[in-house]
Amino acid sequence: MKKTISAIILMAGSSTRFVDDNNKLSYQIINRPVFTYSLETFYNHEKIEHLYLVVSSTTINEVEEYVKENLNSSKITIVMGGLTRAQSVRNAVKEVKEDFVLIHDAARPLVNKVDIDNLINQMDTHLLGTLYHPIYDTVKDTSNNKVVTLDRQNLKATTTPQFFSKKLYEKIINPNISDDKITDEISIFEKDYQVAFVLETSNNRKVTTKSDIDEITYYLNKDENYLIGHSFDFHPFEENRKLILGGVEIPYPKGLAGHSDADVVYHVVAESIMGALGIGDLGTLFPDTDNKYLNMNSAYFIKEVMKHLEQSFYRVENIDVIIYLEKPNLKNYKIQMAKNIKELINCNYVNVKATTLEKKGLIGNGFGIASEAVVLLKKLKY
């Protein structure tokens, strides 16, 4: 008979070791909250019929909103967590109806389908099992004022997910050990049952402190070696404004209209990088309704976007910029523009060129200036 399988995803932790204003599960990695990665991995698994999401008062609103906007809520039950991890698991297990349940910490966003499949395969012969990875460091027991080196060949670092048969649910709900001794659910049963230990096939690091974010970001991005971005922007001329292009002030009777300094070249540089990273457009990050950006030097926008680039573990490989205008002639300014851009984006391969539209259209008839940029981003090695 076919076994039914569900998953409990724990999202109720306090994040006390994660030094940030937000709960670690809400922290954005590549423009998505941490909790969404493991949630979608389990949600999209064809053998998992139902998900039980264990939330806290600080995570419930965000989780409910994400589920409503992105997932089929009929496959999901939201459960309030308890004061301890063990209590949170108990609250969820009381709701579980399936033959087997996988329990996973949402703070492990790198969990993959292969490892879940390998655990599910063990359900045919075991009542419980866990992922693990070997311990390569030397481990010493320093209890009782003694130092003892443990044989690491016999040591396993267990992670999640872990699975349990329906036959064990009651003991999870009513364990015979105290919550402070339950660091994972395997510890409730390990003395009485044979545990299936399944070796992880890839990095399954947990977000515990802020220092974990960089490595996890790298692994989530590891298959995306190159990204391409594009941007086009147009600004009309306006009287009594300076004309600034690529950070260069150019003598001309008129400047460009805009909320900031209207440097259309810097705008497409910043926005093309944003496009490659998938973080929207300039108006999203720097709205023209915010007086903070009134007459702002557009180099600021590039500098802010570069922070996002660094957090995503990419660098600019090259960028090609073209300026569309009838006047003024930019022959004597393009080299300085390219130099300015190179310094802002830390890239040697920058090209700036200009062309007319042969007196056709808005630009050709002298109503404004447009610019366009194509950027190539390259993945950094961790």
Image (cartoon, rainbow, N blue to C red):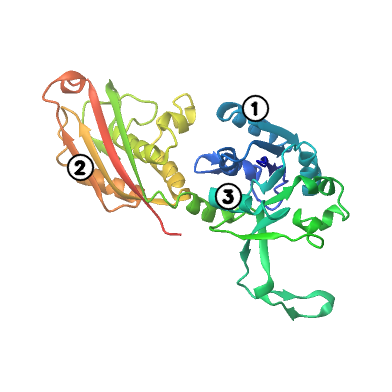
Q: Nearer the viewer, residue 25 or 111?
A: 111
- Label 3 crowd (10 A; few <14 / some 14-19 / many >=20): few
Q: Position of residue 367 (x, y in %)?
A: 22, 20
Q: Which mark is residue 74?
A: 1
Residue nearest the observer in this picture, 30 or 90: 90
| Residue at image location 63% in from the left, 43% down from the top | 25
* Image position, residue 8 (x, y; %): 69, 42
Q: Nearer the viewer, mark 1 or mark 2?
A: 1
Instruction: Name the foreground residue: 211 vs 75.
Output: 75
Q: Nearer the viewer, residue 149 or 50?
A: 50
What residue does disc 3 label? Answer: 117
Does the image show residue 199? yes
Residue at image location 59% in from the left, 44% down from the top: 38
The amino acid on which the numbered mark 2 sits, given as a three-letter code, is: Lys
- Is label 3 in contact with label 1 (beta carbons under 8 Å)? no
Residue 278 lies left or right of residue 318; in this view the side is right
Task: Give the alpha-carbon distance from disc 1 to disc 2, as whole Å.
Answer: 58 Å
The quarter of the picture where residue 201 lies is bottom right
